[in-house]
Image: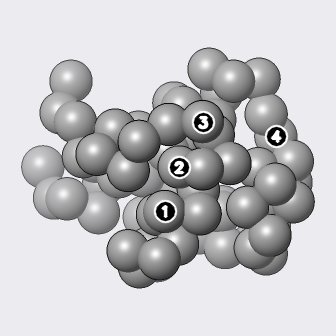
Amino acid sequence: MKLRRIVAQNLKHLRQEKGMSQEELADRAEINRNYVGMVERSENAATVDMLEKLAEALGAKPVDFFREE
């Protein structure tokens, strides 16, 4: 499985686990809501800086985005 897809699946799972919408996550991370959707659909690869913002907004660790189930 490609790393981009793993990150996308983990981001979506973590967001849903916290009961957040894409818009709420984007607001907390201070990023564009469309960007969250694009990352979750594997249309865009998140930068390290963006993964850090998303992890902070989710109360997670950046490494959580790279775990394979």
Determine whether, in the image, residue 38 is placed left or right of residue 60. right
Helix, strand or loop under label 1? helix
Give the alpha-carbon distance from disc 1 to disc 4, as whole Å. 18 Å
Label 1 vs 4, first from the N-terminus:
4
Residue sitting at 69 percent across and 24 percent down?
18
Q: Position of residue 3 (x, y in %)?
A: 19, 59
What amino acid is at disc 3? Gly
Residue sitting at 81 percent across and 54 percent down?
28
Q: Position of residue 13 (x, y in %)?
A: 51, 30
The residue positioned farthest toward the left in the image shown = 1
Q: Which of marks 1 and 4 is in front?
A: 1
Determine whether, in the image, residue 36 is placed left or right of residue 7. right
Label 2 vs 4, first from the N-terminus:
4
- Front-most of 68 and 53? 53
Point out which mark residue 21 bears.
4
What amino acid is at disc 2? Ala
Binning the other alpha carbons within 10 Å of mark 3 as few (below 14), some (14 to 19) or many (20 upward) gives few
Q: According to the image, label 1 marks what residue?
A: 52
Give the alpha-carbon distance from disc 1 to disc 3, as whole Å. 10 Å
Q: Position of residue 61 (x, y in %)?
A: 41, 42
Q: Which of marks 2 and 4 is in front?
A: 2
What amino acid is at disc 1? Glu
Mark 2 vs 1: CB contact within 8 A: yes
Binning the other alpha carbons within 10 Å of mark 1 as few (below 14), some (14 to 19) or many (20 upward) gives some
Point out which mark residue 67 bears.
none
Q: According to the image, label 2 marks what residue?
A: 55
Q: Position of residue 53 (x, y in %)?
A: 59, 63
